Image (cartoon, rainbow, N blue to C red):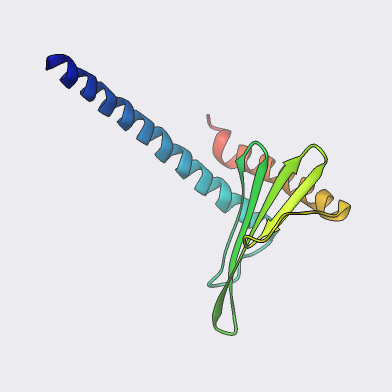
Amino acid sequence: MILSKLFSTKQIKLSIEEQKREAIYRSLIRREAEIGGSLFGPIPEGGRREFFCLDERTWVWHEEWLEDGQKKIRNTRYDMRPGGVLKAQNGQGYQMISLEEARNLQAAIRTYGQKVRQEIYAAI
């Protein structure tokens, strides 16, 4: 009986620690996404823009804007593969991106890395 209580308490503590790590991670991703979204100029009023690295091979571009009073949303995922970069928008199928788009993405990633290091991780 006592062992089961100790074991479940230990699981709860680990779970709380994991929850704290997840909360910190989500907070950092949100801040990185905000910084990434600002790289491409001012965000129109009523709009939102995010650009961030989801994992070691996936980049996300999310944009919301108003058009004729209607909210528009575009989600773009870039999947880095050994043979090239695949792109999917708004849940559609993946397609290989052009060389020009790949160069633009590479420049955006480089700038993103510099800004995120300066604004978030320089003090660490």
Is 7 located above or below residue 67 in the figure?
Answer: above
Q: How many marks?
A: 0
Left or right? Give the position of 97 relative to 67. right
Instruction: Name the foreground residue: 54 vs 50.
Output: 54
Q: Position of residue 13 (x, y in %)?
A: 27, 26
Q: Residue furthest top?
A: 3
Left or right? Give the position of 40 relative to 15. right
Indicate the quadrant where residue 73 lies: bottom right
Is 93 located above or below residue 46 in the figure?
Answer: above
Q: Position of residue 58 (x, y in %)?
A: 65, 44
Indicate the quadrant where residue 116 lies: top right
Instruction: Name the foreground residue: 48 vs 118.
Output: 48
Is 50 located above or below residue 26 in the figure?
Answer: below
Is 48 located above or below residue 113 in the figure?
Answer: below
Left or right? Give the position of 114 relative to 32. right
Query: Residue placed at 36% from the left, 35% from the top?
Result: 19
Query: Residue placed at 67% from the left, 54% from the top?
Result: 39
Q: Position of residue 79 (x, y in %)?
A: 70, 46
Query: Residue placed at 34% from the left, 29% from the top?
Result: 17
Q: Position of residue 78 (x, y in %)?
A: 70, 50
Left or right? Give the position of 52 relative to 27. right
